[in-house]
Image (cartoon, rainbow, N blue to C red):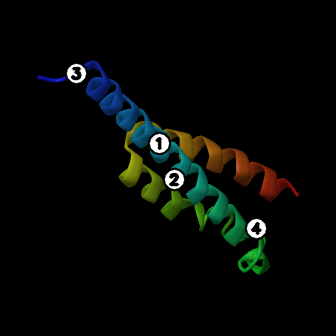
Amino acid sequence: MITNSQIAQRLLDIKNRQALRYVVAFTVIVLAAGLRIWPLGALELRIPWVTFYPAVMAAALYGGFSCGMLATTLCCTAGCILVTH
């Protein structure tokens, strides 16, 4: 028989996994922006989104549709900020 504490533990595990997906998506985008600024800064505006394409794909593959959409939104925001400066 399943007890209430076991149900609560399973729900907590599910919530932690979902949160981890979003943390991974955010981390991948931050790393992509960092790569865009530091080693690929010499490219300037020729290929502004080059590091963000694989970052969005990785976030979507790992976390699913909602994490992919979060990654897309973060990339558009970061890209607009980095390209305009």
- N-term-proximal mark, 1 vs 4: 4
The answer to whether mark 1 and mark 2 are in CB contact below 8 A is yes
Mark 3 in CB contact with mark 2 (< 8 angstroms): no
Q: Secondary structure at mark 3?
A: loop
Please name which of the two marks, 3 or 2, marks the residue nearer to the observer. Answer: 3
- Judging depth in this view, the residue of 21 and 77 nearest the camera is 21
Q: Earlier in the sequence, mark 3 or mark 4?
A: 3
Please tell me which of labels 1 and 2 falls first in the chain: 2
Give the quarter of the image for residue 39. Answer: bottom right
Quarter of the image for residue 42 reads bottom right
Q: Amino acid at mark 4?
A: Leu
Q: Earlier in the sequence, mark 1 or mark 3?
A: 3
Say which mark, if any, is on residue 57.
Answer: none
Q: Which residue is mark 1?
A: 67
Closer to viewer: mark 1 or mark 3:
3
Residue 26 screen position, x and y as percent? 59, 50
Q: Looking at the rendered structure, which numbered label has been put on residue 24?
A: 2
| Residue type at tag 2 | Val
- Name the residue rendered at 30%, 32% in the picture: 10
Q: Left or right: 66 with respect to 38?
A: left
Which amino acid, mark 1? Cys
Determine the secondary structure under disc 1. Answer: helix
For residue 26, side relative to residue 54 (left or right): right
